[in-house]
Image: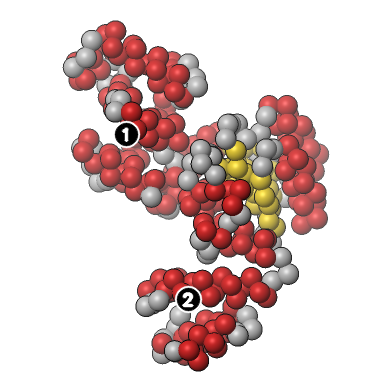
Amino acid sequence: MDAFLEELILAEDEQAFFACLSRHYGRPIGFQELETLDGAAVYRRLYQLQISQVTEDHHQTILRRFLLGRCDVQDMPSRFKTQGSYYQVAVLTGGTTKERSRQGKLLLSLVEDGDTVAFQTHQAFLFHFRHGPVLPAKAEALLAEQLASALQQLFFSYPFPHLARTPTFYEQALLASQLLNTERLVYVDQCFMPLLLAGFENQKLLTSLIHPQLLRLYDHDRAHHTAFYRTMEVYLDCQRDIQKTIDRLHIGRSTLFYRFTKIGELLGEDFYQLDFFAYQLSLAIIHFKEGGGANETLTGALEAFRD
């Protein structure tokens, strides 16, 4: 085994690394098969270290592989792993690699914290912030003007609270760039319906379209023993009929309106100005993923998303 591990460590490149594994196990081994092997964590770590040794830019390699789901959260810079953070992925398309790199530098100068890496057809970004939106309004106007003059497009994923979910939201931003390639500056919530329809062909993407504000309600309920998520669910299921909602929840009118006010405060928006359509579609996704509509299945669906 020691000789085998030494051969893995000395592999000249990625192809040689997997060729060594394939010879040892007598069957084809690729990245996806690593997790099926005994000692998978050791092989994965050796692979990551081997890749970092043969690249000129370790930081860029880690970010690229992290976006693709091919390395672990532990390999990301520590500044991305602070508590109470939100993340967002963006994809920049159009123009040459040099032009995208120049636009990327402008974008990074407008945000609180972020990193970028070049792919063959696009520039990808990972942003890290504590309070949204990631792009201030004035900066958004400037960037939109720059994108128009350069004939480029920029697509933002939903913001998300768990760094490990980054590859899913990278896929989300990529799909948005494929569906709305005539737009200049796009956020996922502006192309929700096209993405939703496409999502039925991609279950991971479909799950990522659950509205992040619903997750905030769910997290708050678990931490503080409130009933805001359940209130929102019933309110929308009752087609926003106040009396039906009161009857279903077995509460008084004043209690319901108190919850509406608190939900608005928690989400930082006027409750009656919330995007109820997106919330209702998000609940439909949860029910769809669980194969039914029973209330008992919602916890499982949300936990699956969070994990």
Compare marks 2 and 1 and give the one earlier in the sequence: 2
Q: Secondary structure at mark 1?
A: helix
Q: What amino acid type is highlighted by mark number 1?
A: Arg
The reply to whether residue 26 is in sight is yes
Give 265 or 143, whichever is nearer the viewer. 265
Q: Position of residue 164 (x, y in %)?
A: 48, 52
Against 200, residue 298 (above or below) is above
Residue that badge 1 annotates:
222
Q: Position of residue 161 (x, y in %)?
A: 49, 41
Type of colouring = secondary structure
Is 255 displayed left or right of 85 in the figure? left
Is 6 displayed left or right of 39 in the figure? right
Image point (44%, 19%), residue name: 264
Q: Secondary structure at mark 2?
A: helix
Q: What amino acid type is highlighted by mark number 2?
A: Tyr
Give 228 or 205, whichever is nearer the viewer. 228
Residue that badge 2 annotates:
43
**CA gap, disc 2 and disc 1:** 37 Å
